[in-house]
Amino acid sequence: MIFVKWFPDDILNGCSLLTWQSELVYYRLINYIYTSDNNLFDDDVTWQVLTSKFNGNYSAIKDELIKKKKIYIQDGKIKNKGCDKWLLEAKTNFEINSERGKRGAEARWNKKNAPSNAQAIATINHKPLTINYNKNIYSKNFKIFWDEIVNKVSKGDGAKHFSRLEEEWQNQPEKLAQLYNNYYLAQDDKKFAKQPAYWLSARKYEDQKYEPKVYSREDEIKDKAKMFIDAIKENKITDFTKIWAKKNKGDVDNALQLGLIKQEDYNLLMHD
């Protein structure tokens, strides 16, 4: 069993412009995508099951969900960008934890001098436990990388995956940061952009074209606040936008001081 993330508020807000029939089908469809491990076939049987509760016209519902970018069809299967992301993250975490468990078991039980018929017996480790008060848990190069990126999420995981990079890449933190920023800023919907940790783990930096660019302070502030500026311009300030604004208050404050957003819009972002 693999556990995935679920965001009720985002789902409710994202479905506010759907008809009630399409909203009901969308909820069921998301669950079927998860339970089928992203292998929900786009055929008559599937759509009849999805609409069986009210005998709806599934053609119209399917058209609406595609038109409003709730789903897309790929290789004969029904897909959702959010499900794609969270299933990949869940599987990645499962594989990492599984590998850790195997390594831990090997380290505990595989003793070179043990006789062939020896049985593994769990023992208590009486070595005194110590507390590590060292706060410098991040490498110098990772700190540079983290300071430069615009989407600072899951720092601990980011540091872990950064430490697993080849030394060649670890020694180019500024280049890595710009490649990530190029990727992140190119995403239309930031909710579906990979977090730094998973971007590093998937080696997406190898897919990006590196073009050295000198950022001014104003450019940096614009980039970091772009999500909020765009939400204001398009009148699409959601609960998710407000939560994210509060988590990145420093970026929003800088945008306000630079005149990129108005005080009334700032107040809207910062208040429930």
Image (cartoon, rainbow, N blue to C red):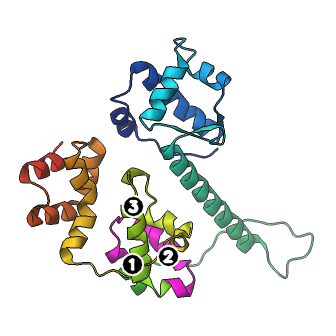
Amino acid carrying mark 3 in the image? Ala
Q: Residue at x 45, y 70 (%)?
A: 158
Residue 133 appearing in the image: no
Front position in the image: 257 or 71: 71
- State if disc 1 and disc 2 touch (CB < 8 Å): yes
Magenta residues? Answer: 145-169
Of helix, strand and loop, which mostly describes the magenta segment? helix
Q: Earlier in the sequence, mark 2 or mark 1?
A: 1
Q: Is residue 218 magenta?
A: no
Q: Residue at x 66, y 38 (%)?
A: 76
- State if disc 3 and disc 2 touch (CB < 8 Å): no
Q: Residue at x 57, y 22 (%)?
A: 50
Amino acid carrying mark 1 in the image? Phe
Please name which of the two marks, 3 or 1, marks the residue nearer to the observer. Answer: 3
The label on residue 162 is 2
Residue on which disc 3 sits: 186
Q: Secondary structure beneath disc 2?
A: helix
